[in-house]
Amino acid sequence: MELKSLANPFPYASPSPICRRPPDPKKKIRPARRSRAPYLKSTCALSRRRAVSDMAVVGAVALSTPTPALAEQPDVTRYRKVGSGVILEDVVEGEGPEAREGDLVQFNYVCRRANGYFVHSTVDQFSGESRPVTLALGGEEMIRGLRDVLIGMKSGGKRRALIPPEAGYVSETLKPIPEEFGPRRSLLSHAKEPLVFEVQLLKVL
């Protein structure tokens, strides 16, 4: 039976050593071609970044999944719009007293673009370790939209909100803001577009 050579389905992968044939002495040796290593390195790096981004988005969605108790109450108005233009959705109600203007609160959040692209989170999507933010609900330190989200929340409660740019990072000094240069630059580069915040209030201090 005649054997036919098949095209390599992975053209950019390095051939396996067991598939190599001994050199034919009758054939001329061609000059070595330039290595594809830099191309492969950049391709692999891009793939890793894509995988990390996808996993982060999946983790953010899982964190904000509504509880069955809320899903079973179709008569409850889950979405509402406040004066700053922020659109809120109550995911988990929480317990205890509500956070009010001037209170010191501690919370975790996940920030995404309106198209679902992950921007930043205070919860590490791999280890689960959190670095909660502690801010006062008053003054000019916090972005206005997030302040409107937190006011009225109870400890353990979760909310999802679409924050318009005019109620978001109108100044680079506003908080919450990542301390690391990369995440900070990424967040501020999207400051002029709506951002989705998924917030969990840990406690009112």
Image (cartoon, grey):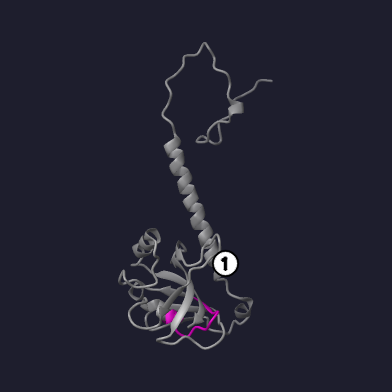
Instruction: Name the residue at 43% across, 85% down.
Output: 103
Vertical order, 69 against 6 (above or below): below
Q: Is residue 66 left or right of residue 84?
A: right
Kind of element beneath mark 1: helix
Residue positioned most to the left: 171
Task: Judge whether residue 12 is colored magenta.
Answer: no
Q: Position of residue 109 (x, y in %)?
A: 47, 71
Q: Amino acid at mark 1?
A: Ala
Q: Position of residue 70 (x, y in %)?
A: 60, 80
Instruction: Name the residue at 40% across, 86% down.
Output: 102
Instruction: Name the residue at 34% across, 71% down.
Output: 169
Quadrant in which the N terminus is drawn? top right
Q: Position of residue 81 (x, y in %)?
A: 43, 81
Residue positioned most to the top: 26
Number of numbered discs on residues: 1
Say which of 71 and 15 sits in front.
Answer: 15
What range is drawn magenta here? 148-159
Q: Which residue is mark 1?
A: 62
Q: Is residue 120 left or right of residue 91?
A: left
Residue 6, located in which quarter of the rendered image? top right
Residue positioned most to the right: 1
Vertical order, 199 against 30 (above or below): below
**Category of crowding for the residue at label 1, using alpha-carbon neighbours closer than 10 angstroms: few (below 14), some (14–19), many (at least 20):** few
